[in-house]
Amino acid sequence: MTAKSPLPPGKFGLPMVGETLAFFTNPQFSRDRHKEYGPIFKSRILNQPTVFFKGPDANKFLFAQENRTMVAKWPKSTATLLGPASLAVKTGHGHRIRRRLMVQAFRPRALENYAVGMDEIARDYCDRWLQLGEFAWYSELRDYTLDVACKLLVGLDQGSKTRLGTLYETWVGGLFSLPIRLPWTVFGKALKAREELIQEITGIIGDRQSQAVNPKEDAQDALGMLLQAEDEEGNRLSLDDLCDQVLVLLFAGHETLTSALASFCLLVAQHPEVWEKLRTEQEAVGWNLARSPRQNELNAMTYLEWTLQEVLRLVPPVGGGFREAIADFEYGGYRIPKGWSVLYQINRTHDDPELYDDPNRFNPDRWNPEGKKSNPGFGGYIPFGGGVRECLGKEFARLELRILAARLIQLYNWELLPDQDLSFVIVPTPRPRDNLKVRFTKRQKKSMR
Ligand code: HEM
């Protein structure tokens, strides 16, 4: 590194506010800046000098630099509400030991168990949607993913209807708010909700510990596994730790999946040719709908896999991630000073015409390995991030997406109701502006239910 290397091009904008407003409200913000300045530029976001990275090489560099020259960084409101022990905010050794323990709740054996629970809840919701007939799907999908998360993470039935569900809504509302600690601010209310959530979770853990007869057999959900988890050095999660980890899992596993499911339902409804191929494949696989699909059946759903992959490319639920430079470093010929933020961009990677032909087109067939340009390589397709902070729940998410999608495709029809705005609100996760209003009916074919 040479002290003479220039800072990245770009402008900071107004003092304090910088370009924060444009960043959050103008979907063209970073596209325009990249056009003007190239793959790396600087700006000021949330009163913080921030360098924008674009392209597979920049992504790979950033992932490899975790805990070397950069560490994960969250806005103050998010970090406070997630809690001091949360996996998402821990860095270095503290992150490593927690991650080693938490990974145990996402191993293939655990996922096999989760598939059964996911499918049971999916069936109940499909019945409910059939009865409702016409409804706004986004909020229903939110309840569905929260119920799945509550059941499989902490063993709680119909979580969206419980006190934990109500508290969660208030807490989540403050995650990306201004961190002003007053009882009537969004953040103040979310902090209060956090306190009560921690009490609820502590109660659930207490009940679990007092009821446990055979802890190994009781460990069916993620909490059960986290209570048992121990690494080779004998480290275990303390009670405070467990509470923060349950919260981060509830959050991370809920908003993102709702967004992905809603995008799937929308894009399939808009592309009948994709729908047709999905149905043909489901009929060929022919899993018994009276039970959850087995791993070999899921593996045979190749076109569904490409479709979901394409959904996560075109509408990534997480647009990118912030890091903080913990030392001066150089990248792409520019100097990035210690203390600055760096943003890697999932959305700008996925809509890069150098990586994807016609990037704005929904085209699941682009993932066919026999196609001409299917694999953008590591760093070019990153819906789940990468490196040591890659999404912990990636396989859980892929499973939940496939299970509900396969059931929907086999058994139901849905059409988009007229007179609604289908454009996307992007922050905090992409969502159709009018919440995706649909008419939901049973498909005319013999069913196993
Ligand atoms: C389609 C659904 C999902 C998407 C697109 C997604 C995406 C991501 C991304 C991009 C990151 C990395 C953020 C960064 O680099 O700063 C991440 C981290 C994380 N995700 Fe997910 N996620 C999804 C579902 C889930 C689920 C279902 C869970 C848990 C049940 C989960 C748990 C986590 C956790 C705990 C982290 C933090 C990991 C760490 O810091 O070590 N995610 N996710």
Image (spheres, rainbow, N blue to C red):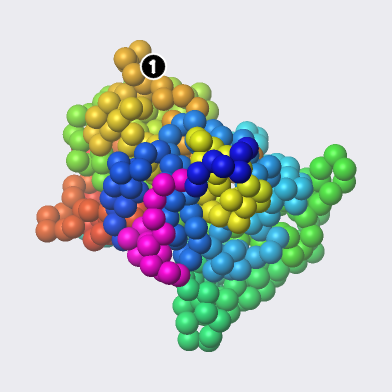
Q: Quadrant of residue 244?
A: bottom right
Residue 9: in magenta span: yes
Q: Position of residue 5 (x, y in %)?
A: 54, 41
Describe the element under mark 1 as helix, strand or loop.
Answer: loop
Q: Is residue 24 left or right of residue 299?
A: left
Q: Is residue 249 visible?
A: no
Residue lying at 47% horizontally and 64% vertically, measured from the top left: 46
Mark 1 sits near ligand 1, with its Cβ under 8 Å away: no
Residue lying at 46% horizontally and 78% vertically, measured from the top left: 186
Q: Position of residue 338 (x, y in %)?
A: 62, 52
Q: Is residue 350 left or right of residue 254?
A: left
Which residue position is annotated with label 1?
369
Residue type, mark 1 in image: Pro
Q: Quadrant of residue 100?
A: top right
Q: Which residues are magenta?
A: 8-23
Residue 277: in magenta span: no
Q: Residue furthest left?
A: 419
Q: Is residue 299 visible?
A: yes
Instruction: Please tell me which residue lies in front, 204 or 425.
Output: 425
Q: Position of residue 224 (x, y in %)?
A: 71, 52
Q: Is residue 330 above or below residue 209?
A: above
Q: Main secondary structure of the magenta part?
A: loop
